[in-house]
Amino acid sequence: MGKYGFLDVLDQELSQNFPFDYEINWDKKNHAVQVAFLLEVENQAGIELTDETGTQSAEDILFEEAVIFYNPAKSRFKSEDYLTAVAYEPKKGLSGEFLAYFVDFLAQTAEAGLDALIDFLADPEAQDFEIVWNEVVFEAGKEKLQETTFYPYPRY
């Protein structure tokens, strides 16, 4: 059983303030925590779409995206596989205030992504769809935080 850490606070924030289906995966060997979320849209017009693997389908859209929290000294991952990557200090961890801000920003980003996905389906000229993480806006908001309570990387 793990001790209370930022993973618990993150899960609590997501369950209370994130309106989409999500899954938290704790990769202990890689010292990383991945949060994947799902956007769902009905494909009422039956538009045939091709995903990034080349598979074509006219079914409803299930779009999965993920973010990762990682230890800069120990974690290994491909940044292009994630919407964003957030480094943490192993002993200090992440603050409760940061995690609340992060989940709020992630929810806003996912909601904008859902709107963009709906617009993408409605536009016959659209070629590509992607969710965009606005790092500049995120960092500007992060600078305004008053961080007081820190939660370490979870121990097991």
Image: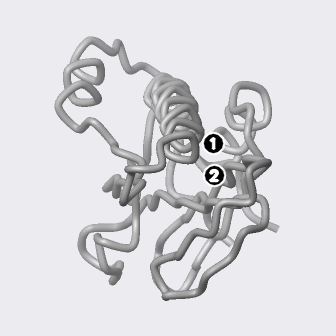
Query: Which secondary structure, mark 2?
Result: helix
Q: Can residue 20 be seen in this view?
A: yes
Q: In the displayed structure, would residue 39 be above or below residue 29?
A: above
Q: Do the residues labelled 2 and 1 touch (CB within 8 Å)?
A: yes
Q: How many labels does the image show?
A: 2
| Horizontal relation, residue 64 to residue 83: left or right | right
Q: How crowded is mark 1: few (under 14 residues within 10 Å), some or many (20 or more)?
A: many
| Horizontal relation, residue 90 to residue 152: left or right | left
Q: Residue at x 66, y 38 (%)?
A: 9
Going by the numbered disc 2, the residue's amino acid type is Leu
Q: Kindly identify which residue carries mark 1.
A: 10
Residue 20 marker: none
Measured as percent of width and height from the top left, residue 97 is found at: 48, 22
| Residue situated in front as seen by the camera: 79 or 44 | 44
Q: Distance between the residues labelled 2 and 1?
A: 5 Å
Measured as percent of width and height from the top left, residue 144 is found at: 26, 12
